[in-house]
Image: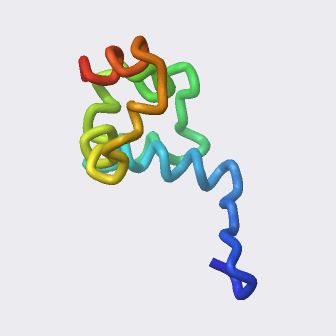
Amino acid sequence: MTDTGKFTTPARKTKIYAYLEALLGETDSEKEKIKERKRNYRETKHWNIAPANPFLKPLKAFLDPYFPNALKKHSPGFKNTLSSL
């Protein structure tokens, strides 16, 4: 947070790096895939952010306690999709 109380949004490259680091990064070969020169932007399991994507289950599990009423604000179809995760 800055002195004015506002948050600084990271650069796009930093966001992508952090996103891939959350998905990968356990082994040396996976850590290499995070770097710009080794990124595979066509790897669907990294870039598919549909709620039913199994790679998002850990993220959903982490966020659920912080947003207990979030599904009430969305349509029933959206709720059913998320509850199937």
Left or right relative to 34: residue 30: left
Q: Nearer the viewer, residue 49 or 76?
A: 76
Counting every numbered tag in the picture gives: 0
Q: Quadrant of residue 54 in the image?
A: top left
Residue 68, position in %: x, y? 31, 44
User: Residue at the top extreme?
Assistant: 77
Whether residue 60 can be seen here = yes
Q: Quadrant of the N terminus?
A: bottom right
**Looking at the image, which residue is at 41% across and 12% down?**
77
Residue at the extreme front: 72
Q: Could you tell me residue 45's position as x and y percent?
A: 40, 22
Looking at the picture, tell me which residue is in the foreground, 59 or 27.
59
- Residue at the image point whose x is 33% and y is 23% from the top: 82
Residue 78, horizontal then vertical, whole percent: 43, 18
Q: Is residue 65 left or right of residue 36?
A: left
Which quadrant is home to the C terminus?
Answer: top left
Can residue 29 be seen from the camera position used here?
no
| Rendered position, 61 above or below 17 | above
Point 29% across, 44% down: residue: 64
Indicate the position of residue 55 as horizontal and vertical percent values. 31, 29
Q: Residue at x 39, y 31 (%)?
A: 71
Query: Camera-side residue: 11 or 61?
Result: 61
Q: Residue furthest right?
A: 4
Does 59 sit above or below residue 9?
Answer: above
Specify the color scheme. Answer: rainbow
